[in-house]
Amino acid sequence: MLGVVCLSGWIICLALGELWFEWVHALGSSFFGQVCTVAWVFALFYHLLNGIRHLCWDVGWGFELPQVYVSGYVAMVVAGLLTGVVFMFS
């Protein structure tokens, strides 16, 4: 939720002018801003992959306990890889 508020604030500051945008850009470019951005992108990918996982459960796939654990670990690893790919090419 906080990530969406920050993204909305960034868009609003973009509309308010160069001074506001530079301030928000400096905040986002700081170490704390970059850590928060990476965490937010990871959370987005993790949420997306868990949504796909739950859709699979809705059709009856992967209910056995070992498959549940494996799919959870796969979701975390793939979310980490996708986050790395996003920041590698940005």
Image (spheres, rainbow, N blue to C red):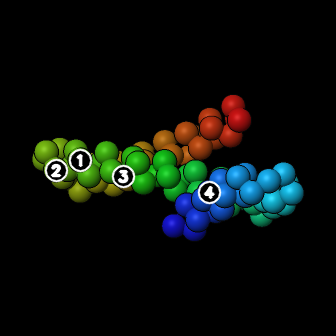
Q: Position of residue 66 (x, y in %)?
A: 27, 52
Q: Secondary structure at mark 3?
A: helix
Residue closest to the eye, 4 or 14: 14
In the rendered image, the vertical position of residue 52 relative to residue 89, given as above or below = below
Q: Secondary structure at mark 1?
A: helix
Location of mark 1 (residue):
55
Measure how far apart labels 2 and 4 are at the Cα level. Answer: 32 Å
Measure how far apart labels 1 and 2 are at the Cα level. Answer: 5 Å
Residue closest to the eye, 37 or 66: 37
Measure how far apart labels 4 and 1 are at the Cα level. Answer: 28 Å
Residue sitting at the far top: 89
Location of mark 4 (residue):
7
Classed neighbour count for the residue bearing mark 3: other residues with Cα under 10 Å, few (<14), some (14–19), many (≥20): some
Which image quadrant for residue 52? top left
Residue type highlighted by circle 4? Leu
Q: Tag on residue 58?
A: 2
Residue type highlighted by circle 3? Asn
